[in-house]
Each structure stands twice: as structure tokens, then as C-alpha cells.
Image (spheres, helix red, strand yellow):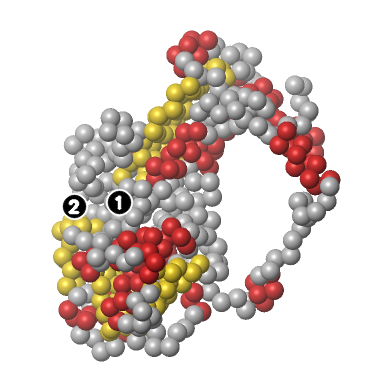
Amino acid sequence: MKSGLYQTFHDLVEQGGEVGQRRPRIDGVQNVTGSRKYVDDMKLPNMLECKGVYSKHPHAKIKVDTSKAEAVPGVAAVITGKDFPHNLYQEYIPDHPCLAEGKVRYIGEWIAVVAAETLEIAQEAAELIDVQYEELPALLDPRDAMKPGAISIHDQFPDNIVPYTEDINRCQIRSGDVEKGFAEADHIFEHTFSVPVQEHAYLEPHAALAQMDDSGKLTVWSITQMPFFHAGDTAGALKLPLSKVRLIAQQSGGAFGGKNAPSLEPHVGLLAMKTKRPVKWAWTLEEEMQCWDTRHAYVMTHKTGVTKEGKITAKQIEAICDNGAYIIWGTMQMHKHGILGCGPYRVPNYHFDGYVVYTNKQPGGAMRGFGIAQATWASDAQMDIMARELGIDPLEFRLINCLKDGDLGQTGCRLRAVGIEQCLRKAAEMSGWQISV
């Protein structure tokens, strides 16, 4: 039987019309001929170019002297954190300064930006900015950062763990009775998995261009994936009415989530306001990989109870997210991680604790189902291990436990249009994999 959602879609396809039909790419010709204009291709009259200054240490107090850079002929403006009317991005947890002020928390964190007549002058001036570092202990492993007595990366979070409520410092999910589930199991498996950070590696690094007109309205062209959200961030950092900020999302040369978070928009906006000229800041690939967010690294411990017939009875997960220096999307992706921690498998008794932990590394951010890829990889890696230990075919083991239409998810939602069993059986048929269930 096909689910209601699948049947509705199938009927629409059969009836013809737009559903199920290929549509021409309106930007296809420009993309394949290379004629599409990206932000870094844009040039406005009297435009200034930017270069940034980045932290050389993972954790340190800083003092910044920009006087030598400001004296370089051709330099129009230099900004540091103190120049922003409100030196914070307006994210879920406001911990992220537009430019580091008083302290840096990872190698590559932005400290200052120079706007000059040419890129070469901006680079020369940036190299003259004097940053004095007073190094602090660096926490590079989230498990070390969680230990009692570890130095605090942010004063408001002394244990380096992001709180979810006033009383709970972790993301929790509870369904069923996990102890009862383990008591019903014939075998209990426990494994710890870890995954590193992952770079998006899109072709176009971050870039933004800003111009303020005579009426005081700021226009920003950016590679953003979330123009309305980032317009608000820019307005907040610059203390402008939102009606005075227009953010135009330009063609993006790849993103995959890495252009979800606000980035260069407040900086070029502030420089345009200070200089009364258009200002562009475009990163190199080296700057992109050193300075911006990545997929989150994780350490995940899965404890799973299974009967001798191969039926999962319970699962308990502890997930520790290496969040890096600033939250950005850390708490949101941990919710996703917990909800899908069991993968596409039926687990009647589930206990999840997820910790989002600050470290002195690049912030973690959005990347293709952020939080989910790490969770499902660990789940399926353990499925293979358990199947081998139980002497059960790994595909059959999955078919025994896969979710079906009408099952409840781990947060109590009723699941519809679940296609995992059909997908597995079709893959087995096409590959010649013999199964008996």
C-alpha cells in the first residue's frame, strides 16, 4: 500500500501539468558560458577594496594599534571592533562579535579590516596593523573544555557548555523506558565514534559589496543564502532601521549551508558609511578555509540493546559537539542530531543527551543537513558492527528494524511516507543482494 502523501504526489504526476515535469534553468546559459556576474565581478565607480587582519593565536587577549595602517597613502578607513555601534551578530545566542574586541578565540578570527584604493594598498596597510597578543590556554578538544577547572572561553558560559534552559546544559530527548529496553535485550553494544570538521569547498569564497546613497539607505550585495535574516543582522550591528538596509542576494558559486550565517555584510556596510564610497571585501580561498565555519566535529557514544533475533530494544546516545568559538547554528543542529540519532530505524526506548561545547577552533556552522550527517553515520556504522557480531546479514538487520509508515518518531510525531524499506529492497534487487526477510 502506498502512503497517502505518496499516492497524492503520484496522482498529480499522472494528471500531468507542472508536477513531475522538468523545467528549464533560467540561469543555465549564463552559468555554462561563464557570463554570470558574481559579487567579486562587480565594480562600482570610486569603489574601495578591503583586506582583513586575522588572529595568529587560538586564544589570547589583544591590543590593536592601527595608526601605521591609517597613515598609508591610499587607505580610506580602518575598522576594529570598537567602531561598530553594536559589535555583535544577532544570532540565537549573541556571542559572536563582528570583529574581535579585547580577545580572540580561534586562529583566523577577524580583528580589523582595511579599505583602500586598491587591493595591494589594503594588503600593505593590513600588514602594518600591530596586534599585541597575551596568550591564554587553548582548548582544542571539547572533552577537555568540559572538564572542571578548564579556562572559560566565554565568561557567560564558565563551563564552556551552551545551556538549553536555566537548569539543563544539554539537549535532551526521552522516549519510552531505556532501562527496561536494555533489560529486554540479549546483547548490549557500546561504541564511540568521532568525526572531524569538514570544509564546504565551494568554488566562490565569501564576498560582499556595500554602497550608501545620499538618503542614508545602505545597499549590500552579498553571496548570502539568507538575505532577509542577514539584512537584520547588518541593521542591528550598525544600529540602522531595517527600512534603511537593502540586502541583495547575488548568484552564489556554491554554498551548501556555508553561506547561511551572516559574514562580511556589516563590515562593508560600516566602511561604506564611514567613507561615503562603495566598498567591496572578497576573500581568497585561503581566507575562506582559515576564517569561516565548517561542518561540526563530533564525539558520539552509542549504547544499543538488541535481541538475539536482531530487534533493537533500546538506544542511549551521548553526543558531544565541538562547536568551535561561536555558536552560529550550534544549538539548532544539535536538536536535529538528537531527533535523528537513531537513523531510519525503530527504537522503542531512546535516551539522548547532546552537549554543545565551546573550543578555540573555527566555529561550526550549517552544512548539508547540519547535525544529521554525523548522527546517521554513527548510527549506521554501529548497525554494521552489531550485524557482524550477531551473525546477521547487515541488510536483513536493517530490514528487521527499519521504520514504517505510521510509526512514531523519537519526539512523538507520526511518520508518513517512510520509504526506507522500499529503498533497501530495491537496492537489493538491483544489486543482486540475496535477502530472506
Of callouts 2 and 1, which one flags the residue occurring earlier in the amino acid sequence? 1
Left or right for 42, reference 13: left
Q: State the quadrant of the C terminus.
A: top right
Q: Residue at x 27, y 46 (%)?
A: 139
Q: Identify residue for label 2.
A: 136
Checking the image for residue 374, the label placed there is none
Q: State the quadrant of the N terminus.
A: top right
Left or right for 355, reference 15: left
Q: Position of residue 339 (x, y in %)?
A: 50, 33
Q: Secondary structure beneath disc 2?
A: loop
Above/below status of 276 relative to 1: below
Q: Residue at x 44, y 14 (%)?
A: 179
Mark 2 Cα-neighbour bin, 10 Å: few <14, some 14–19, many ≥20: some
Checking the image for residue 94, the label placed there is 1
Q: Residue at x 34, y 76 (%)?
A: 216
Mark 1 Cα-neighbour bin, 10 Å: few <14, some 14–19, many ≥20: few
Judge whether residue 9 can be spotted in this image: yes
